[in-house]
Image (spheres, rainbow, N blue to C red):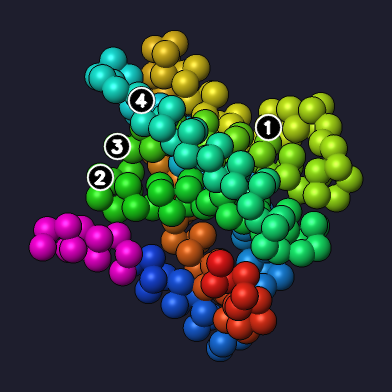
Amino acid sequence: MDSFWIAARVIVPMALTVGIGMLLRVFHITDKPTMKQVDNLIFKIFMPALSFYNIYNTDFTQLRNVGYIFYGACGILLLFLLSMTVVPKMVHPRPTASSFGQALFRSNYLLFGTAAAQSIYGVGNIGLVSLLGAVAIPMFNALAAILLETGRHGTASPKKLLLAIARNPTVIATVLGLAVNFSGLEIPGLVLGVVKDIAGLTTPLSFLSIGVSLSLGAVAKWRYLASI
């Protein structure tokens, strides 16, 4: 029963926030173009701030087992291989198969995983979740690029992949968080408080954006792919 209430505490706020986002669109309070600009802020500012804050506050001396990172990486690779081999046999043409395949393994881990952990443990206590995200996000980006490029052109450029990873704001924030954490530098409380406030905007704004952008009609149109 405890597990049920923990799950409800995580899922219900997410669902309600998405629902509010849908209502905002229905009543024309906001629209998809506006939320695209918000998404840009989330990707470039809020989510990196969340990753930096969580990793900065993690006490890595207390870590006993980081095998979960290896486990997560192996799971991503397994889904990627399935996307490369099985999906093209079920979905046609190849470009569509590539798009569907990358959606199969490229999860919203940093958003949903972080939100779930944050609901249970609170902001600042989920550094391990962010650390896994630092591994998962580059993998998602690189493997998705490989899948999409091979689906369109048959090859993928290693240089473009490396540049995409190096320029990812969340990856940069993670590296900075690790550097500051291990250097022993202490960020002034006033500055850290601002970072915390910005980080706290990530989850509610992200789920509002999902609600505004959600199109149930698209699910019906692509019901065959959705059923897979």
Q: Amino acid at mark 3?
A: Asn
Q: Residue furthest left?
A: 1
| C-alpha distance separating marks 3 and 2 | 6 Å
| C-alpha distance separating marks 1 and 2 | 29 Å
Report x, y in % for residue 111: 47, 51
User: Considering only order in the chain, which callout, 3 or 4, is on the residue closer to the N terminus?
Assistant: 4
Residue position for label 3 = 125
| C-alpha distance separating marks 4 and 2 | 20 Å
Q: Residue furthest top?
A: 183
Residue position for label 1 = 165
Eye-nearest disc, 3 or 1: 1
- Span shown in magenta: 1-12
Report x, y in % for residue 64: 26, 19
Residue position for label 2 = 121
Eye-nearest disc, 1 or 4: 4
| C-alpha distance separating marks 1 and 4 | 23 Å
Q: Residue at left 52%, top 52%?
A: 108
Label ID, residue 202? none
Report x, y in % for residue 123: 33, 43
Q: Amino acid at mark 2?
A: Tyr
State whether the magenta stretch is mostly helix, strand or loop. helix
